[in-house]
Amino acid sequence: MHSHFFVESLLLMLTYGAKYLEGGLAIAVFIVIAGSRSSVTAIRLGLLAMATFALWFSTVISVEVGYSVWQSMPDPPDDAFSNTGAIFWLVAGWLPSGLLLGALYRILRVAWPPLETIPEEVGQAIKVRQYGGSVALV
Protein backbone atom coordinates (compact mmCIF):
# COMPACT_ATOMS: atom_id res chain seq x y z
CA MET A 1 0.00 0.00 0.00
CA HIS A 2 1.33 3.41 -0.92
CA SER A 3 1.34 6.30 1.50
CA HIS A 4 -1.03 8.33 -0.68
CA PHE A 5 -3.80 5.85 0.20
CA PHE A 6 -3.24 6.66 3.86
CA VAL A 7 -3.31 10.41 3.23
CA GLU A 8 -6.33 10.03 0.94
CA SER A 9 -8.27 8.05 3.54
CA LEU A 10 -7.26 10.48 6.28
CA LEU A 11 -8.56 13.43 4.24
CA LEU A 12 -11.81 11.60 3.47
CA MET A 13 -12.21 10.69 7.13
CA LEU A 14 -11.70 14.28 8.26
CA THR A 15 -13.82 15.79 5.47
CA TYR A 16 -16.87 13.56 5.10
CA GLY A 17 -16.79 11.33 8.16
CA ALA A 18 -15.81 13.96 10.72
CA LYS A 19 -18.99 13.72 12.79
CA TYR A 20 -18.45 9.98 13.33
CA LEU A 21 -14.81 10.55 14.21
CA GLU A 22 -15.67 13.39 16.60
CA GLY A 23 -18.32 11.30 18.33
CA GLY A 24 -15.97 8.35 18.76
CA LEU A 25 -13.19 10.62 19.99
CA ALA A 26 -15.49 12.26 22.55
CA ILE A 27 -16.63 8.87 23.86
CA ALA A 28 -13.06 7.56 23.96
CA VAL A 29 -11.73 10.62 25.80
CA PHE A 30 -14.54 10.37 28.37
CA ILE A 31 -13.72 6.68 28.95
CA VAL A 32 -9.99 7.44 29.31
CA ILE A 33 -10.70 10.22 31.82
CA ALA A 34 -12.92 7.89 33.85
CA GLY A 35 -10.36 5.10 33.66
CA SER A 36 -7.44 7.29 34.67
CA ARG A 37 -9.24 8.23 37.89
CA SER A 38 -9.61 4.62 39.04
CA SER A 39 -7.24 3.16 41.61
CA VAL A 40 -7.75 -0.43 40.37
CA THR A 41 -5.26 -1.38 37.66
CA ALA A 42 -7.54 -3.88 35.92
CA ILE A 43 -10.30 -1.28 35.62
CA ARG A 44 -7.86 1.34 34.29
CA LEU A 45 -6.46 -0.96 31.62
CA GLY A 46 -9.87 -2.36 30.72
CA LEU A 47 -11.31 1.11 30.19
CA LEU A 48 -8.25 2.12 28.16
CA ALA A 49 -8.82 -0.92 25.92
CA MET A 50 -12.53 -0.03 25.59
CA ALA A 51 -11.63 3.55 24.65
CA THR A 52 -9.13 2.33 22.06
CA PHE A 53 -11.79 0.06 20.55
CA ALA A 54 -14.32 2.93 20.46
CA LEU A 55 -11.90 5.26 18.67
CA TRP A 56 -10.76 2.50 16.29
CA PHE A 57 -14.38 1.68 15.43
CA SER A 58 -15.19 5.33 14.77
CA THR A 59 -12.17 5.70 12.46
CA VAL A 60 -13.27 2.67 10.43
CA ILE A 61 -16.83 3.98 10.17
CA SER A 62 -15.72 7.50 9.23
CA VAL A 63 -13.41 6.20 6.47
CA GLU A 64 -16.20 4.03 5.08
CA VAL A 65 -18.59 6.99 5.12
CA GLY A 66 -15.95 9.17 3.47
CA TYR A 67 -15.39 6.72 0.63
CA SER A 68 -19.12 6.16 0.09
CA VAL A 69 -19.77 9.92 -0.09
CA TRP A 70 -16.86 10.35 -2.49
CA GLN A 71 -18.12 7.49 -4.67
CA SER A 72 -21.67 8.88 -4.76
CA MET A 73 -20.58 12.26 -6.13
CA PRO A 74 -21.36 12.96 -9.77
CA ASP A 75 -18.56 11.69 -12.03
CA PRO A 76 -16.19 10.45 -9.29
CA PRO A 77 -12.54 9.79 -10.18
CA ASP A 78 -11.17 6.24 -10.37
CA ASP A 79 -9.35 6.78 -7.07
CA ALA A 80 -12.71 6.94 -5.32
CA PHE A 81 -13.15 3.22 -5.87
CA SER A 82 -9.78 2.13 -4.46
CA ASN A 83 -10.89 1.47 -0.90
CA THR A 84 -7.45 0.39 0.28
CA GLY A 85 -7.40 3.18 2.86
CA ALA A 86 -10.42 1.66 4.57
CA ILE A 87 -8.65 -1.70 4.78
CA PHE A 88 -5.64 0.00 6.38
CA TRP A 89 -7.81 1.54 9.11
CA LEU A 90 -9.59 -1.76 9.64
CA VAL A 91 -6.34 -3.69 10.13
CA ALA A 92 -4.01 -1.13 11.70
CA GLY A 93 -6.29 1.64 12.94
CA TRP A 94 -6.00 0.44 16.52
CA LEU A 95 -2.34 1.54 16.59
CA PRO A 96 -2.86 5.32 16.22
CA SER A 97 -5.95 5.05 18.42
CA GLY A 98 -3.99 3.27 21.13
CA LEU A 99 -1.04 5.64 20.93
CA LEU A 100 -3.20 8.76 21.11
CA LEU A 101 -5.33 7.52 23.99
CA GLY A 102 -2.34 5.97 25.78
CA ALA A 103 -0.58 9.33 25.72
CA LEU A 104 -3.71 11.05 27.04
CA TYR A 105 -4.02 8.41 29.76
CA ARG A 106 -0.39 8.90 30.84
CA ILE A 107 -0.72 12.69 30.87
CA LEU A 108 -3.85 12.44 33.02
CA ARG A 109 -2.21 9.99 35.44
CA VAL A 110 0.80 12.28 35.91
CA ALA A 111 -0.95 15.67 35.90
CA TRP A 112 -4.09 14.62 37.79
CA PRO A 113 -3.33 11.60 39.99
CA PRO A 114 -6.27 9.83 41.63
CA LEU A 115 -6.89 10.29 45.32
CA GLU A 116 -5.29 7.70 47.56
CA THR A 117 -7.87 5.28 48.85
CA ILE A 118 -8.00 3.87 52.36
CA PRO A 119 -7.79 0.07 52.31
CA GLU A 120 -11.09 -1.53 53.30
CA GLU A 121 -9.81 -3.15 56.49
CA VAL A 122 -8.32 0.15 57.68
CA GLY A 123 -11.46 2.05 56.71
CA GLN A 124 -13.58 -0.22 58.90
CA ALA A 125 -11.32 0.26 61.91
CA ILE A 126 -11.25 4.04 61.66
CA LYS A 127 -14.38 6.13 61.86
CA VAL A 128 -14.13 9.43 60.08
CA ARG A 129 -16.42 12.31 60.94
CA GLN A 130 -16.59 15.59 59.16
CA TYR A 131 -16.99 18.82 61.06
CA GLY A 132 -17.55 21.65 58.61
CA GLY A 133 -14.55 21.55 56.29
CA SER A 134 -12.25 19.55 58.59
CA VAL A 135 -12.00 15.82 59.23
CA ALA A 136 -11.63 14.33 62.71
CA LEU A 137 -10.63 10.74 63.46
CA VAL A 138 -12.58 9.15 66.29
Image (tube, helix red, strand yellow):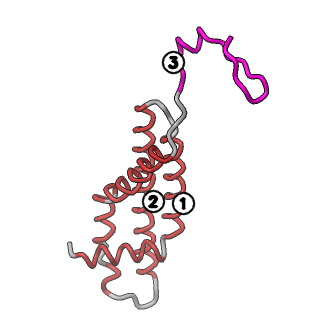
Based on the displayed image, in which of its 4 quarters is residue 96 positioned? bottom left
Q: Which residue is mark 1?
A: 23
Say what secondary structure mark 3 lies in: loop
Give the image quarter of residue 133. top right
Q: Residue at x 33, y 67 (%)?
A: 86
Q: Which residue is mark 2?
A: 58
Is 60 part of what is drawn in magenta?
no
Which residue is at 41% across, 32% downward? 41
Pick whichever, 94 or 78, lies toward us: 94
From this viewpoint, which residue is outermost toward the left? 1
Q: Is residue 12 left or right of residue 30?
A: left
- Please report contact status of discs 2 and 1: CB closer than 8 Å, yes or no: yes
Quadrant placement of the C terminus: top right
Q: Residues within 10 Å of mark 3 (few under 14, many from 20)?
A: few
Q: Residue at x 45, y 43 (%)?
A: 109
Q: Amino acid at mark 1?
A: Gly
Q: Which residue is mark 3?
A: 119
